[in-house]
Amino acid sequence: MRDALRAVQNELRRRGVEGNYTRVENLHLTLAFIGEYHDPDAVLEAMAGADFEPFTLKLAGLGAFGELWWAGLEESAELDALVRRLRRALADASIPFDRKAFRPHVTIIRKPTYKNDPRLGSLAVPQAETTVGRISLMLSTRGKNGMIYTELGSVPARENG
């Protein structure tokens, strides 16, 4: 999936779109934004309560939230259920998180600028999929060359069966 997202970014560059492209190693799907919180172990414990089996996600289209352009994902009942369980576990543990409605997307560029219309709607997204086998708690810090993401821990999917 990362290769497909990189291809989309490269096509946008070819079309003359400039901006703050998400580095390939930083491409991710946020399930719940926690912000600053003092106890990562408590978050990881809550995450473990979201119990899920591995499932597949597929890319589906491009879109924008103002100055943020993203790649979308096909609807997934498994993803929606995981997000509900995760957010319930965080709330039950009194861990604050952003309660905005979940809109699954992977940010590909922020603050895009372009001289000619890049025809975002005409850009084909390569078929790609990935298996979700774990969820991670990430620390994000702003570095001089963009965001730096550090995994603080992860919770694996349970084995099938």
Image: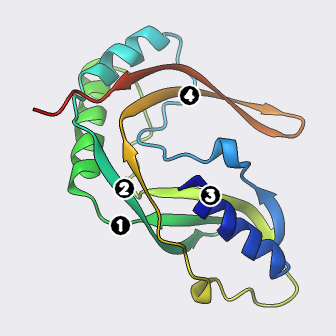
Callout 2 touching callout 3 (CB < 8 Å) = no
Front disc: 3 or 4 = 3
Q: In the picture, residue 159 is in which quadrant?
A: top left
Question: Which quadrant is home to the C terminus?
Answer: top left
Q: Is 55 or 109 nearer to us in this picture?
A: 55
With respect to residue 95, does 59 lie above or below? below
Neighbour class for label 1 at 10 Å: few (<14), some, many (≥20)?
some
Q: Which residue is located at x 35 percent, y 36 percent?
A: 133
Q: Earlier in the sequence, mark 2 or mark 4?
A: 2
Q: Earlier in the sequence, mark 1 or mark 2?
A: 2
Mark carried by residue 57:
2
Q: Which residue is located at x 29 percent, y 20 percent?
A: 48
**Mark 4: amino acid:** Met
Callout 1 touching callout 2 (CB < 8 Å) = yes
Q: Is 94 or 132 nearer to us in this picture?
A: 132
SS category of the residue bearing label 2:
strand
Q: Which residue is located at x 27 percent, y 40 percent?
A: 54
For the residues labelled 2 and 4, the Cα–Cα distance comes to: 20 Å
SS category of the residue bearing label 4:
strand
**Mark 3: amino acid:** Asp
User: Badge 3 is on which residue?
Assistant: 3
Front disc: 2 or 4 = 2
Mark carried by residue 138:
4
Q: Earlier in the sequence, mark 2 or mark 3?
A: 3
Q: Earlier in the sequence, mark 4 or mark 1?
A: 1
Front disc: 4 or 1 = 1
Q: Which residue is located at x 56 percent, y 28 percent?
A: 138
User: Badge 1 is on which residue?
Assistant: 74
